[in-house]
Amino acid sequence: MTTAEALEVLNVRPQTLYANVSRGKIRAKPDGEDPRRSLYHRDDVLRMARRANGRRKVDVVSSEAMQYGDPVLPSAISTAWDGRLLYRGHDAATLADSASLEDIATLLWQCPADEVASQAASQAAGAAEAAEATGVAEAASAAGAAGLAVATGNGSALAAGLLALARRSASDPPSLGRAPSTLRAEAADVLATLACAMAGDNDGRNASGGRSSGGAGLPISRRLARAWGAEAHEDLIRRALVLMADNELNASTFATRVAISTGASLAAGVLAGLTTLTGPLHGGAARQFTDLLAHAQANGASQAVRDWLASDRPLPAFGHPLYRDGDPRAKALLKHLPKVASHEELAVAAEQQAGELPNIDYALSTLTAACGLPPDAPFILFAVGRCAGWLAHALEQVQANRLIRPRARYTGPAPVNAGIY
C-alpha cells in the first residue's frame, strides 16, 4: 500500500503510521518507482486497522487470539522473540550449529541429560519390532496405495506415521496421573516410533526393503540419512530437525495440547498434531510450493507468483506472521545450502510482488533439491522434528492438569419461540 492508502485504511495521522513502522508493527520498504516514498505491507495495515483505536471488545480480542493474536495459554517451551526463535531461552539457530534432535528433546522436556538418549537407544529397537509385529510397514504400503495420504509424495511415510501412532493410541495408557519420569520415557518411545515409521526403517530395514546395518539406536538424523541414501548430508538433516523442533503455539501444537488436556495418551496427542500438520496451510505447504515451482518452470517465476496471488491464496513457503524481518530458521539453514536457481527466482519474485521473504518451508524444499532427498523429505523433517515439540507441550499440558475448552461466539439465528411446521 502507498502512504495515502495506508492512512485512509487506518484513519490516523502520518506520525502514527511512522511510529507503527518504527515499532515493527507495520512492515515497509522503499517504492521501486520512487525510493523517496515507502510502501506498507497490506496485511500489517489491515491488522492494525482491526485493532481500532486502542481498546477492543472482549469477543474481538478472543477471536483474534485464534489467529496470531494475544497469547491464550502460558508456556515456557518456546517463543518468537525479537526476530529469533528461542527454545527455553536458547536461540534455536545457535543450537542448530551443534545439537541433535535428541539434545533438543532433552532441553524441551526438562529431563536429565542422559535420559532421552538412553531411552531413544533402548526404545528404537523395540519400536521397530513392534512396528514389524503389527504389520505397520505392510499396512502403510497398502494405505498409501489406497490413497489415504495425499499430503506427501507417494504417501507411504505419512501413512506409516499415522498408522504407527494410531496403533499406539489404541493401547497406550492415559497421560494424566503418571510420574513425569515415566511420561518422559514414554515420550522418547513415541518419538522413536514416529521416526522409525516415517524413515521406513523397521528393525533395520531400509526404505527399499533391504537390510541396513544396525540402524537401531542411531541418532534420528542418521537414521533418516541412511534411509534416504544421503549420509553425506546428515549434518544438514540434523540442523533441519533441530530448527523444526518447536515454534510456539502453532496449529498442530495446539491440537496436541487440546488432546492431551482430555487425558489422552502421548501417542494420541502426537497423532492429533500429525493429522493437523498435513493441512496445506501448515506442514503441507511444501507440497503447495512444489506446485508453485512447477508453474514457475512452465511460465516463469514472476508470472507464477502473479497468478498465485491473483487466485487469492497465501503464497506458500514465503512470509511468516511471527517473523516480520524473515524467518530465522530459514536463514539458519539456507546459509549452509548451495543456491538453487529455480528457488532463487521465486524468492526474488515473491519479495518484489508480495514483500515476503523465504520461510522454513522454502528452506526445507531447497535442502531437498540441493541434496537429492525424496520429494516428501520436507514433510518428514517437519513432522519428526516437530514431534519433539509436540511431546514437550504434551508434558507441559499434563502438568497444567486443565481441560482446554474454549467457548464459541454464537452467530446463528435468535431463539425460535414458535413451533417448527
Image: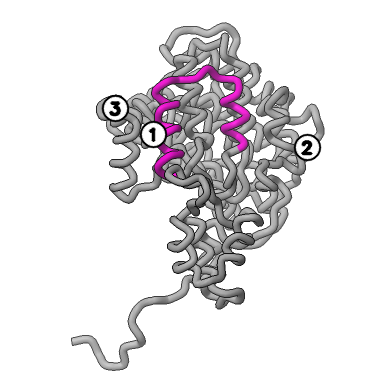
* Residue 111: mark: 2
User: Residue 367: x, y in percent?
Assistant: 50, 22
Secondary element type, mark 3: helix
Label 2 sits on what residue type? Cys
Residue 241 in view in this figure: yes
Q: Is residue 349 above or below residue 24?
A: above
Q: Which label sits in the foreground, 1 or 3?
A: 1
Residue at the location (28% across, 41% down)? 307
Q: Mark 1 is on which residue type? A: Phe
Q: Nearer the viewer, mark 2 or mark 1?
A: 1
Secondary structure at badge 1 equals helix
Earlier-in-chain disc, 2 versus 1: 2
**Which contiguous range is marked in magenta?**
328-354
Of helix, strand and loop, which one carries label 2?
A: loop
Front-most of residues 150 and 122: 150
| Residue 209 point in image, percent of width and height | 42, 12
Who is closer to the viewer here, 65 or 34? 34
Label number found at residue 194 = none
Q: Which residue is painted at 36% across and 24% down in the image?
A: 141
Q: Nearer the viewer, residue 205 or 228?
A: 228
Instruction: Tell me the residue that label 1 is attached to.
Output: 289
Residue sitting nearer the eye, 100 or 69? 69
- Compared to 195, does 170 lie above or below? below
Q: Quadrant of the N terminus?
A: bottom left
**Residue in the image at 74% along x and 24% along y:** 118
Left or right of residue 211, residue 155 in this image: left
In the rendered structure, are the residues bearing label 2 and label 1 in contact, judged by CB atoms less than 8 Å apart? no
Q: Is residue 241 above or below residue 23?
A: above
248 lies left or right of 252: right
Could you tell whether 391 is left or right of 7 in the image? right
Name the residue that disc number 3 marks: 145
